[in-house]
Image (spheres, rainbow, N blue to C red):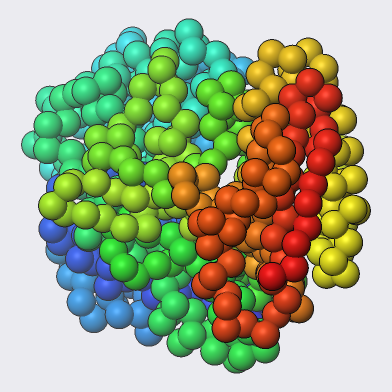
Amino acid sequence: MKYPIGIQDFREIRTGGYVYVDKTPHIHRVLDSGKYYFLSRPRRFGKSLLLATMNELYCGAKELFEGLWIHDQWDWETSQRPVIWLKFAKMDYKKKGLEKALVDEMQRIAKENGLYLETDTLKDNFGELISKIADNQKVVLLVDEYDKPIIDFLDDVPQAEANRDVLKSFYSILKDSDALLEKIFITGVSAFSKVSIFSDLNHLTNLTIDPLAYTLLGITQAELEMVFAEQLAQHDKEQVKRWYNGYSWGSDERVYNPFSILRFLSSGQYQNFWFETGTPTFLVKEMKRQKLYDISNRQQTYGDLTNFDFTHLNPITVLFQTGYLTVKKYEPEDLLYTLDYPNREVQFSLEQMLMAIYMEDPLNESIPRVVNIRNALRTKDINTVIRVINSAFAGIPSEHWQKENEHFYRALIHLTFSLLGTYIHSEVNTANGRCDAVVETANHVYAFEFKLDQPAQTALKQIHDKGYLTPYADSPKEKIAVGVSFSKTKKAVVEWLVEDL
């Protein structure tokens, strides 16, 4: 089987013998339901392939759809339209500047269609291009990664604002061109406020968390088992789901990131495929600045999820739109969405990077440290667990620790035990009345309670009083309570007590 890993060209997939998960029923349903669309999805989720498929549909490439659902459902005779397809990832706006890059793109498309543009401004160029390409037919406009000139400059707000203003002016011509447009489909990673960029597209339908698009992109469990049954049979299906499934934008049905699951099926190895293609250094630094390290079970409104102001960055909104958080539950009565990590791949990768940022550790030694803790817990070697934890705290730069020692303490403990969950079952809780961490190995169940500048006996008493190990009473595993006292002044664990229950 040939996997189309990283291939965004529908024609290449269909003519090159690559496997294709048939998304044409979903595409047909969307295209048949309206005129102006916007869709936000994380990177590597198939947005470019989606537009490439639409391009071939409107260009009338019927032969490419042989054997697919839409082949006998699409009106090939009357649906053919001229297409303008803008691909911002292909434009050299960093070197030329966004306005010049767009002007050059208008000229390129015009030349490709045997046309000459006579107007002087970018906005007029765009309007003239639409008018001349239409030639008594309505035009389909596809815009891929519209927000890239903004996303690429989130750490340079003046440039991001300048690029936003260029885009707003550029798209403003679309209102006057309405009679010439058959369809508009715009994709991106982030749903910036329509008021700021698409202010004249009053009927732009945001599909980001619309039922029409729940499974438009991504691979469902049913699709995976149908198309890749033979390959999937070689692996633990539940383990594969834990690692790579889990994305949702509102429904109970969850999807796999196509890039990650195809890489896994191709290699047969559990790795962080998606994360390695785009490390969010700026975003993780912003999370640290805002003291945000525990992002699970966050409740947000519709407005939080569909818009954000990059001049006052809300990391939770960005984490959702870029794929590090996903919808786990929606409460219609409260109009609230509960967000959490989609899967193990994403959680492990982001927390590992957070740990490295907190520790200012370019070598990223957090994983060897966590593995050492796992190995020690398997042999009930609590002394080694404490030693490893203390070595981690010793690595925190003194100036940072002195400024916000309690925050660093909380963050490091949380991230250490959360990362431990990648290797053995480890639950990290921060709510009142819940244990700091419960860790299970093959033969043991540990309840860890950490106290800051309080006796270890106080921590141990809380484990007893709150009954943190009671849910495991019927388990044949050995139950162990660990009370830990951490000193802010010494920047280390100074006392710990262990009790078998």
The correct choice, above or below, for 215 with respect to 96 in the image is below
Q: Quadrant for residue 235, please give it.
A: bottom right
Residue appearing at x 58%, y 50% in the figure: 462
Q: Quadrant for residue 411, please give it.
A: top right
- The quarter of the rendered structure image containing the N terminus is bottom right
Give residue 185's position: percent from left, percent from top: 28, 45
Give residue 412's position: percent from left, percent from top: 70, 38
Report the side of 221 relative to 364 (left or right): left
The correct choice, above or below, for 48 with respect to 232 in the image is above
Pick the residue in front: 67 or 326: 326
Residue appearing at x 75%, y 68% in the figure: 500
Report the side of 219 relative to 482 (left or right): left
Report the side of 392 relative to 96 (left or right): right
Give residue 308's position: percent from left, percent from top: 35, 28
Pick the residue in front: 95 or 327: 327
Q: Quadrant for residue 189, please give it.
A: top left
Give residue 274's position: percent from left, percent from top: 62, 54
Residue appearing at x 54%, y 70% in the figure: 470
